[in-house]
Image (spheres, coloured by chain):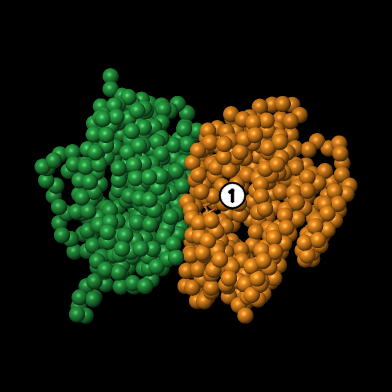
């Protein structure tokens, strides 16, 4: 029987799943995911996690509850740093420990540490460790790692080309398939925030779909080329934001505001998020300098209702539309 | 001349004031955080900013009203938010129209140039390097003296016969230490303080519970932010030992009382091997060390939305079970009320007392 490794559809899933899946499959391990977030998963997470934790971490707990009984291992790598500069939110850093010590009846956890500040081969070493644990030969791990990285490269390319993770993943799995490009809509918004909030259609209350229906095209930090982001340096601050996703979001905000590439900017933030308390304020300060591009913060929590978000979104879109029309008339 | 202020943490301002004045600066002493401080902080800091950031925001605004135009504070390299407080505070203050200078001390080991540059900027009267070092040593000694007095007050308070004696004497001796200037004077004031505190009349027959306090540094060190939890516990007959002081940790005790000679980090590593910023890992390690030393219970103090303490708190119930020690957590913010806190503390102390007297198993309390 093949070994089954469980990967929760939460947090880093949205950026690294294609790599992980390719890697595990290549070394002959079956990957089981927890599927899309559901009401039930959210409830489980809320029950299992600390009340003071942020929603995404609660969801992570929920997804763990969903798969823990169906797999031989849970894959919760301790991803600390992958770019030698920024680290992930401290909650990511303690993720395997939080799960291990607070959820009962869990299978063994694969919690290899990934920190590229420890040297160029830190990631390869981490995967070798995983391979060893699962009984794969070094050669096969090496090959799997290279293949997985190629898959990740293709995935990232798809993201840069404007697909969202769900679309990109299905394009990857069905080579040759053609997805309908979203029609060129009249308005374009930047949606900033963490991938695990933006692309989890349940917790974001279907934000992306809603915008599409309102005739708004969406640009996220993942759609922007990394070089343009790096060029933002520290965004005029004495230090960069310490956390990878926050740093990227702020850079994306600066880039988009400066270029004036979008008609509006939304920041999607989760209730109880620590880093966002800084990030949101810094984006707000930048927005103040660019009054021509309207900015709105949307906060989600475990009780966010369809209705509330829809009304606010519609009002915002309407406002942006009217402004744009008014500007067009003036010209 | 610029007027300098800095964050307030407990009584430490006395030493920092002395040091800055020795270097020739005019100092605006940050007032003790009050309701107004919190109101200001909440109004201008982001909603989910951690509690210390909000209090400091309020404090800065108050000191600016008092004429301060330069803020000296610390930076940091992460992974937690404290290292970025300064730049957020600075931006918010600027946005409010306050043209403030921020002098941010980064860890000297990583940023030696920054350290020297900042020190230079603060050295208004051009003291020689030797002189600066001497001033710093004296300020440090003052901090140590105050920490020692505070530690002793934690031992005396639960045993005092007349309620309030310890707090009264403690206030008084702080004044002595505050007045002391030269190295000899500080040492003299310290021994006088220890003697005064030690001679508070005490009831030696009382059964005293021992509780360790762990958590995030700011809410541990600033009594106004933790609603004087140590005093409340002392009055309930509990001797507290706080895991953190500005001048160091209660390491000596720890080493001699546990046979394994574990460090905090080693103790924590089976549960949390990773540094998660702030003092999350210390909270776990110290809990285990206190349990090994036979303490009756642990209180974890954490700011609302504090990332490392949330990680620690998620793991602590397991630690509590494995090491048979009760843990009570307080997530503190502007809405925490003293009455509610006291009720929960009384229930906790009751439970610990029953366990001590009748030896019942600890039920891990949740926070
Ligand atoms: S970045 Fe925010 S939302 Fe994400 S895990 Fe950390 S606290 Fe939670
Ligand atoms: S340790 Fe807690 S209080 Fe300190 S900066 Fe981090 S989140 Fe804020």
Instruction: Tell me where residue A327 sits by quadrant.
Output: bottom left
Q: Quadrant of the C terminus of chain B?
A: top right
Relative to A270, B256 lies left or right: right
Q: Residue A85, how many percent across, how many down?
A: 39, 53
Q: Quadrant of the N terminus of chain B?
A: bottom right
Mark 1 within 8 Å of ligand 2, using the beta carbon:
yes
Instruction: Write down which chain is painted green.
Output: A
Residue drawn at x 66%, y 27% is: B361
Relative to B106, A310 lies left or right: left
> Which residue is at the front of the view, A231 or B240?
A231
Chain B drawn in what color?
orange
> Which residue is at the front of the view, B334 or B56?
B56
Relative to B5, B350 lies left or right: right
User: Under tag 1, what secondary structure?
Assistant: loop
Picture layout, residue A139 above or below residue A269: above
Check disc 1 and report the residue beneath it.
B216
Q: Residue A223, how many percent across, how many down?
A: 25, 55
Residue drawn at x 21%, y 80% is: A330
- Mark 1: give few (<14), some (14-19) or many (20+) Cα within 10 Å: many
Q: Residue A58, how many percent across, how many down?
A: 43, 42
């Amino acid at each position: 029987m093949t070994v089954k490794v469980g990967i929760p559809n939460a947090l880093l899933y949205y950026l690294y799943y294609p790599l992980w899946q390719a890697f595990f499959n290549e070394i002959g391990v079956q990957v089981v995911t927890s599927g899309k977030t559901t009401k039930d998963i959210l409830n489980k997470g809320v029950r299992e996690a600390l009340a003071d934790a942020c929603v995404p971490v609660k969801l992570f707990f929920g997804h763990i509850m969903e798969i823990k009984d169906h797999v031989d291992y849970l894959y919760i790598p301790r991803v600390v740093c992958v770019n030698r500069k920024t680290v992930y939110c401290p909650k990511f850093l303690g993720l395997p420990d939080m799960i291990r010590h607070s959820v009962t009846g869990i299978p063994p956890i694969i919690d290899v540490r990934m920190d590229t500040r420890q040297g160029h081969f830190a990631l390869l070493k981490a995967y070798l460790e995983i391979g060893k644990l699962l009984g794969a030969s070094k050669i096969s791990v090496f090959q799997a790692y290279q293949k997985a990285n190629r898959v990740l490269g293709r995935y990232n390319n798809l993201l840069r080309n404007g697909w969202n993770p769900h679309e990109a993943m299905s394009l990857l799995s069905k080579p040759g398939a053609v997805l309908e490009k979203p029609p060129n809509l009249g308005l374009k918004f930047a949606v900033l925030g963490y991938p695990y909030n933006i692309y989890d259609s349940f917790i974001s209350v279907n934000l992306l779909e809603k915008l599409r229906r309102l005739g708004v095209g969406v640009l996220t930090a993942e759609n922007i080329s990394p070089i343009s982001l790096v060029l933002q340096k520290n965004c005029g601050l004495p230090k960069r934001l310490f956390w990878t996703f926050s740093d990227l979001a702020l850079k994306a905000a600066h880039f988009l505001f400066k270029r004036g590439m979008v008609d509006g900017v939304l920041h999607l933030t989760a209730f109880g998020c620590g880093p966002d308390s800084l990030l949101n304020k810094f984006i707000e300060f930048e927005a103040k300098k660019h009054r021509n591009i309207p900015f709105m913060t949307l906060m989600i929590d475990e009780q966010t209702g369809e209705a509330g978000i829809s009304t606010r979104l519609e009002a915002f879109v309407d406002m942006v539309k009217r402004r744009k029309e008014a500007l067009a008339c003036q010209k | 001349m610029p007027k300098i202020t800095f964050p307030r943490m407990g009584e430490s301002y006395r030493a920092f004031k002395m040091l800055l004045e020795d270097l020739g600066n005019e100092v605006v002493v940050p007032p003790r955080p009050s309701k107004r401080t919190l109101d200001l902080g909440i109004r201008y800091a982001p909603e989910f900013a951690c509690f210390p950031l909000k209090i400091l925001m309020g404090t800065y605004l108050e000191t600016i009203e008092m004429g301060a135009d330069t803020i000296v504070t610390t930076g940091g390299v992460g992974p937690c938010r404290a290292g970025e407080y300064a730049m957020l505070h600075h931006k918010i203050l600027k946005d409010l129209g306050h043209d403030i200078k921020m002098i941010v001390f980064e860890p000297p080991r990583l940023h030696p140039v920054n350290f020297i540059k900042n020190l230079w900027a603060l050295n208004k009267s051009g003291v020689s390097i030797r002189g600066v070092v001497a001033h710093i040593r004296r300020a440090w000694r003052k901090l140590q003296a105050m920490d020692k007095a505070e530690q002793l007050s934690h031992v005396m308070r639960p045993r005092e016969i007349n309620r309030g004696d310890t707090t009264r004497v403690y206030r008084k001796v702080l004044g002595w230490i505050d007045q002391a200037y030269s190295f000899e004077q500080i040492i003299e004031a310290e021994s006088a303080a220890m003697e005064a505190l030690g001679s508070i009349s005490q009831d030696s027959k009382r059964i005293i519970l021992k509780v360790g306090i762990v958590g995030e540094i700011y809410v541990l060190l600033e009594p106004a932010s933790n609603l004087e939890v140590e005093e409340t516990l002392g009055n309930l007959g509990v001797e507290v030992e706080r895991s953190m002081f500005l001048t160091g940790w209660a390491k000596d005790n720890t080493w001699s009382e546990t046979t394994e000679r574990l460090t905090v980090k080693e103790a924590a590593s089976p549960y949390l091997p990773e540094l998660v910023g702030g003092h999350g890992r210390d909270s776990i390690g110290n809990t285990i060390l206190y349990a090994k030393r036979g303490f009756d219970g642990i209180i974890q103090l954490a700011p609302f939305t504090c990332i490392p303490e949330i990680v620690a708190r998620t793991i602590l119930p397991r630690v509590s079970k494995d090491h048979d020690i009760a843990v009570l957590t307080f997530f503190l913010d502007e809405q925490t009320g003293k009455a509610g806190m006291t009720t929960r503390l009384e229930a906790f102390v009751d439970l610990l007392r029953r366990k001590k007297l009748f030896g019942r198993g600890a039920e891990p309390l949740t926070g």
